[in-house]
Amino acid sequence: MGATKACNPFSSVNFASKKHDLGFSLMNQLPVAEKRFPKSEHDIAADYFALRKNHTGTKWVFSEGRNTSNSASHCDIAWASALATCAHNERRCTVGACVVYEDGSFSSIDDPNNDSLSPEAHLLWSYDPRIWRRL
């Protein structure tokens, strides 16, 4: 039986060091419609469009402009969306399953040696880009 590993459902993100990557990821998703928001929710759209990108001579710096639909906003909705993408890309949004038998042995969906799944189930639970694509 394998050693148990503590599972923390929350992961920290150093926003100061990751803000550049998060901002560019978000900016790249908008023109190809990987991030969509309802037209009726003007404050959400305004949050995205309030993000500012400035070049300082050595690097790009992201900052928050004024959200005309929500004066209390500091682009929190847009940054939350960028963090959600980061979590998704790091596959922190998955769940796993494991069966522990009376003899102490176990099998898991994540176990590459698990042959108990049908070929269809392997496809269903996989991350194969030939089958699944991001919206």
Image (cartoon, rainbow, N blue to C red):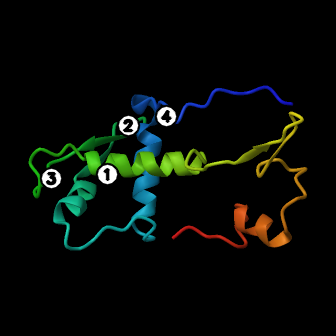
Dot 3, crowdedness within 10 Å: few (<14), some or many (≥20)? many
Q: Nearer the viewer, mark 4 or mark 1?
A: 4
Identify the residue at horizontal 79%, vertical 72% (top origin).
Answer: 120
Q: Nearer the viewer, mark 4 or mark 3?
A: 4
Q: CA distance from mark 2 to mark 3?
A: 27 Å
Q: Earlier in the sequence, mark 4 or mark 3?
A: 4
Q: Nearer the viewer, mark 2 or mark 3?
A: 3
Tag of residue 10: 4
Kind of residue indicated by mark 4:
Phe
User: Which residue is the site of mark 1?
Assistant: 78
Identify the residue at horizontal 71%, vertical 62% (top origin).
Answer: 125
Q: Decide: marks 2, 3 in contact (CB < 8 A)?
A: no
Tag of residue 67: 3
| Helix, strand or loop for disc 3 | loop
| Helix, strand or loop for disc 2 | loop
Identify the residue at horizontal 61%, vertical 31% (top origin).
Answer: 7
| Helix, strand or loop for disc 4 | loop
Tag of residue 57: 2
Q: Nearer the viewer, mark 4 or mark 2?
A: 4
* Front position in the image: 101 or 85: 101
Q: Position of residue 77 (x, y in %)?
A: 28, 50
| Helix, strand or loop for disc 1 | helix
Dot 2, crowdedness within 10 Å: few (<14), some or many (≥20)? few
Q: Decide: marks 4, 2 in contact (CB < 8 A)?
A: no
Q: Is residue 12 placed above or below 22 in the rendered structure?
A: above
Q: Earlier in the sequence, mark 2 or mark 3?
A: 2
* Front position in the image: 110 or 86: 110
Q: Is residue 130 placed above or below 86 in the rendered structure?
A: below
User: In which quadrant of the rendered image does the N terminus lie?
Assistant: top right
